[in-house]
Amino acid sequence: MIRIHSLTARLATLFAVLTASLLVLVAVLFGRMLEVHFQELDLHELQGKAALIRNALQQVDAVNGGRTERIQALERSFVGHASMGVLIRDAGGRVLYVIHPEHFTAAQRAGERLSGALADWKVDERPHRGIEVSIALPSIGSNNQTIEALVALDLSHHVHFLASVRNATWAGVVAAAFAAALFGWFAAHRGLAPLRRVTETARRLSARQLGERLTTNDAPLEVRDHVEALNGMLARLEAAFQRLGDYSADIAHELRTPISNLMTQTQVALSRPRTIDEYQDILASNLEEYERIARMVSDMLFLAKAEENTLAHASEPVDLAREADALIDFYEALADERQVRIVRQGQASVQGDRLMLRRALSNLISNALRHTPKEGQITIRIDADAAGVGLAVCNVGDPIPADQLERIFDRFHRGSTERTRHGEGAGLGLAITRSIVQAHGGQITAHSAEGVTCFMITFPRLEASSPS
């Protein structure tokens, strides 16, 4: 079995086969209708000739004509009809007279009757069709009152006509199938042009060249969704490569500082002999840098698990007010040192992992402390309604630019183009917070205007949640 791998060739073949099948069906039906039509015409002509014979013989009998007058009347009836013949037999089957005997078989001339009202036979490979009728005569012999007349018609002209029609029909079927195949190939070739452009674009794509897009102006409806999906995929790939490049640059920058500190301190320590206390101070400083790198690696692993949806967490009722109060107590010393007040309003419970939710809230409070000026206030607002449970952490201070709000939850992003450091943060706290919130089916947004910045978390309302 031959397999056609080209879709264009398959469609062209399908067009040709379908067209040829339909035309063959039409040709068969048309040929059958022609045969039936010719059969009806032949029967009508034979019946007419038989009626003419009957009238001619009976009219001769009516005036008491003899045998010679009857034969002459028959011969006059077949003048100009060389394709027809007549055979007259008596009731006993004896042949009385034959006109154009070449249209009858030897058996018929010997007295064989027809098998039906309308019969077909061949004489020297020439097809014939005929009928047999009985004609009542008052006197054709002393004892014969009826005769049998066999009328035959040569069908050669019908056969030649049907053969020419059949040949012309098959030639038309072949020509139409070829034309349909050519049209199908052309239509499929034009219709699949967008797919070829997709292939050409895919060949040109690389990690450094992801900005090309496919046009949908001339794409058919069946291909347009495919083209739009590929354009969307290319846009996502381009954004992913861009984020990957930014992430690589950011993590290289973040790791460069602690590694540079470790190298510098180690080189200084080895530059000359030192006391045990000095070595201990250097090792303690190095330990801080190691802890910083370890936290960064741990946070990156946490984010990687969150992106792969493999972040396992428990499911238990969590009192958000209790967790907020515990964190306020934890940050109380640092808040007093910076002369910042932390207050909590409202209460509600959600279903989730208590430690992960505490970490998310802790990141928001720590971030607010770093950006709240002296004598400022941080407000933790918890409420619940029919839509769900809301938690907001708001602080006064310099607002976040509007163009930075959309990227504030990205890794290593600090809300400014300059890599200034606020405290010990590495720019992963808000990214981790978003991952935790999303793992619990919630959403987090940021709003900053008129000197107040708010991070708002919305958790879906579950049966375990209770309004304030």
Image (spheres, grey):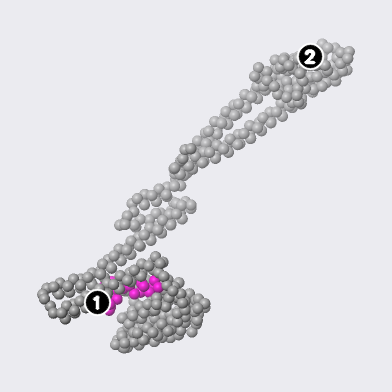
In reply to whether residue 383 is colored magenta, the answer given is no
Task: Identify the residue at the far front of this view.
Answer: 276
The image quarter in which residue 403 lies = bottom left
Is residue 183 something one can see in this rendering? no
The image quarter in which residue 74 lies = top right
Is residue 467 something one can see in this rendering? yes
In the shown orientation, is residue 271 left or right of residue 215?
A: left
161 in relation to 75, above or below: below
Residue range corresponding to the magenta coloring: 416-436
Local crowd size for mark 1, using a 10 Å CA cut-off: few (<14), some (14–19), many (≥20): few
Task: Estimate the x, y position of residue 37 in percent, counting from the top left.
Answer: 69, 31
Helix, strand or loop for disc 2: strand
63 in relation to 186, above or below: above
Residue name at image x 39 percent, y 87 percent: 343
Per the rendering, the mark at residue 395 is none
Task: Estimate the x, y position of residue 342 in percent, counting from the top left.
Answer: 37, 86
- The residues tagged by marks 2 and 1 sit, at their Cα atoms, a distance apart of 134 Å
Residue name at image x 36 percent, y 70 percent: 302
Task: Estimate the x, y position of residue 283 in percent, counting from the top left.
Answer: 20, 76
156 in relation to 295, above or below: above
The image quarter in which residue 362 lies = bottom left
Q: For mark 1, what is the residue?
A: 288
Q: For mark 2, what is the residue?
A: 95
Three-letter amino acid code of the residue under disc 2: Val
In the shown orientation, is residue 256 left or right of residue 166?
A: left
